[in-house]
Image: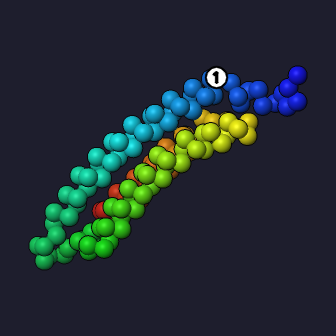
Amino acid sequence: MDPNPSTDQHEGTADKVAAWILYALQLAIEGVLFLFSLFSVMATDPCGTGVDEPRICSGYYFTAAFYGFWLVLLVTALAVPLLIQSAGRHGKLRWLRPVAAIVVLVIATVVYIALLSQ
């Protein structure tokens, strides 16, 4: 007999499958965002005109925003599988980890776009 029957609902196959499907969705979203970040270099097109240049024309500003966004993509891609495994060992819902990562990606994308548009 299981000494902790309340964890049965968290250790089910449905939770595992949902977590890994959501992680695959997260990776697909990250792939699209990575491509988006490569094309964001075009935000510097108005640079060099000398007339009312946007903040993005500062090399340090753009580099910090660009690589900061890549860092968020990398950390979420690497951390979520570890968090899914950890949640499974502790009897917690696994599918919440990739959902939280997707929310973080949405927030990071909004912040990145806001930084590029300045």
The front one of 104 and 86 is 86
Left or right side of 71 for 12? right
Q: Can residue 107 be seen in this snapshot? A: no
SS for dot 1: helix
Please report the residue visible at 48 percent of the width from the left and 53 percent of the height from the top: 75
Q: Name the amino acid type tagged 1.
A: Thr
User: How far across and how far down the image is residue 59, in percent?
Assistant: 26, 72
Residue at position x 82%, y 30% in the image? 6
Residue depicted at x 39% and y 37%: 28
Q: Is residue 76 left or right of residue 13?
A: left
Identify the residue at horizontal 70%, vertical 38% (top origin): 89
| Vertical arrangement, residue 27 with respect to residue 57, above or below | above
The colour scheme is rainbow
Position of the C terminus, as image quadrant, is bottom left
**Crowding at mark 1 (Cα within 10 Å: few <14, some 14-19, many 20+):** few
Relative image position of residue 22 (x, y in whole percent):
51, 33
Residue 11: quadrant of the picture: top right
Question: Is 107 on the left or on the right of 66, as rendered?
Answer: right
Answer with left or right where residue 27 lies relative to residue 92.
left
| Nearer-the-camera pick, 86 or 49 | 86
Location of the N terminus by quadrant is top right
Residue 35 seen by the camera: yes
Residue 32 location, quadrant: top left
Tell me residue 8's x, y (percent).
76, 26
Where residue 99 appears, x then y in whole percent?
55, 40
Depth check, front residue: 89 or 30: 89
Q: How many marks?
A: 1
Q: Which quarter of the figure has residue 30?
A: top left
Q: Which residue is mark 1?
A: 13
48 relative to 116, above or below: below
